[in-house]
Amino acid sequence: MAAAAVWTDRGRRAKALLRLLTGSRSRHTALQPCYDALIIGGGEKHRGGFGEEKLRCHAAYLQKGGVKTAVLERRHVLGGAAVSEEIFPGFLFSRCSYLLSLLRPQIYRDLELEKHGLKVYMRDPHSFTPMLEEGIKGAPPRSLTLGTDLAKNQNEIGKFSLKDAKAYPEFVAHLEKLAGAIHPLLDSPPVDIQGVTTGSPMKRLAAAKTLMPVVKCGVKLGGNIPDFYEILTAPLMKILIQWFDSEPLRATLATDGVIGAMTSPSNTGSGYVLLHHVMGELEKEKGAWGYVEGGMGGVSKAIAKAAQSYGVEVFTEKDVGQILVGSDGAAKGVVLKDGTEIHSKVVLSNATPYVTFKNLTPKGALSEEFTKAVDQIDYTSPVTKINVAVDKLPSFLASPTPDDKPGLHHQCSIHLNCENVDLLEAAFKDAKNGRPSARPMLEMTIPSVLDPTLAPPGCHVVSLFTQFTPYLIEGREWTDQDREAFADTVFDWVEQYAPGFKTSVVGRDILTPPDLERIFGLTGGNIFHGSMSLDQLYLARPLPSLSDYRSPIKGLYLCGSGCHPGGGVMGSPGWNAALTVLSDMKCRREI
């Protein structure tokens, strides 16, 4: 506990960093009564998603296109769920979103995010799966470590299966090809089906341009189109069994197929969830994930600074109560909960579709048929996020570090209770039966081993992304006792892999699905603004009638993760929605 004694001094420094990361209202100009575009970042139970940076990304591109834009944030911190918060004195956490990969490269370049302060710590190796087993002849338990060096990966996999070690490079290349083919679809709105099939020949020809991303995707895939179809529709285990025999490798790869999703590796659609999580890149490295300096709020801060450099006005603590709809049925602005009216030509909502249309839109402005469809969007979430402050580094039985100095494995995503796929299946079944998992799937990250700004010297911040936990426990709401009991279960399992972990804990922040909904507005606690299931992707995200970012109310648009292409700190929904709004306003400039 000696290291924790420096909390007070470090707390002052962390608060200064936090002010830097979150901004200050005093830097903003006064809120004007009228703008061209208003972007809703927050309101009653409607903070964005694990990709909240989209609203400022959207704002930056609108302002670049000549549209006077303001962003209205509910909380005192920028970033929604991509946020940095000092939960315990001296410890700065990425409270929800905790890794960066999916942010589109052109957005990174266009908005000059590095110039605006974004710094990313790359991780290599990036995955560590320790076994819970007795070591052979006094050796430590086995573990599986994966990184960018294919030869080292093969050596690691060879500890479990030489056949799998030989197949792994081909599997990685295969997955990269499939993921790379998706990129044209990410950076464009879905096909304009109505435009292509109705109207004058000239209008159909213009709409046919929206087919080009699909054509580009098909060309990139070539003869791999059947493989692409399979990974979209098949259970992930069907694919992994075709490639590999060893359980630790299967289970480690399977975690990316269920992360954030209430599904199991044997369920249809889990293959796409895997693809979604490997299609990003950092520093031109495909599939890489990294830590943002100062926490994930650093992403939001950099995008906000870029947006402000173009003239966007960003306001915190502006709680939107309702969207204003005129007598002509068009959006006219918003009214804050304090009664302040702000008018605009268009309104863009980064809230979930459910909150946008059920909580923020005036009753009677939407048809009963439409609201019924909104009610059917799936927001089921399996996630409980636990943020932990510790006064010493966890030392794993599979890779001991008695001197408290970080090993390469400490920078990884550390997969616990992932020795075999049966463990993941059992954890899922517990939650489907209305109970928190007795042996939950755990993804631990310790970003402070690379980023010294996050914790006092000798101390660390630990993120535990846990699955599976239901929204309701056997039909009833979570109690404080339930939260603490589940966290105790998680810590008991961590203790088995890293003895001494529990005694190092100096504070913990437990966010169950209802907590994620209450604090960050993630409907159902779903980090993607809606399940990434096949019936809620592309032309059907979030609904077939809403896939083009336009709502039934003229001038009201969606721009968050509930839109195509979905969740993650990506920016694509904001980019695509900005293009749609600028086109509709007929003021599109070169952006």
Image (cartoon, helix red, strand yellow):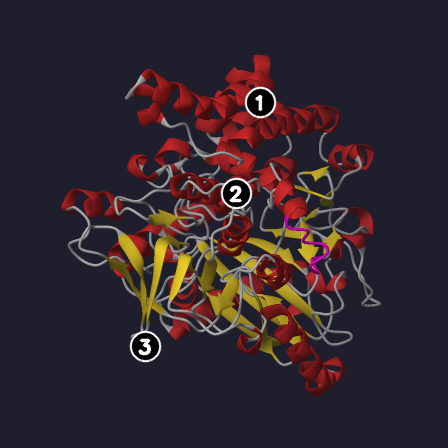
User: Quadrant of the image for the C terminus?
Assistant: top right
In this view, 498 is above or below 551: below
In this view, 87 is above or below 47: below
Nearer the camera: disc 3 or disc 2 = 3
Structural crowding at the residue carrying mark 2, measured as other residues with C-alpha within 10 Å and reported as few (<14), some (14–19) or many (≥20): many
Q: Nearer the viewer, residue 105 or 147?
A: 105
Marks 3 and 1, how far apart in space?
59 Å
Please check the rendered image and state whether residue 167 is part of the magenta-colored stretch, yes or no: no
Which residue in the protein does label 3 denote?
A: 338
Query: In this image, 308 relative to 39: left or right?
Result: right
Upstream in sequence: badge 3 or badge 2: 3
Tell me the kind of residue under disc 2: Ser
Which residue in the protein does label 1 denote?
A: 242
In this picture, which residue range is highlighted in magenta? 111-118
Tell me the kind of residue under disc 3: Asp
Tell me which residue sits at (60%, 44%) in the image: 102
State the image coordinates of residue 162 (x, y, percent, origin top left). Answer: 75, 27
Q: CB atoms at circles 3 and 1 under 8 Å apart?
A: no
Marks 1 and 2, how far apart in space?
33 Å
Local SS, label 3: loop
Structural crowding at the residue carrying mark 1, measured as other residues with C-alpha within 10 Å and reported as few (<14), some (14–19) or many (≥20): few
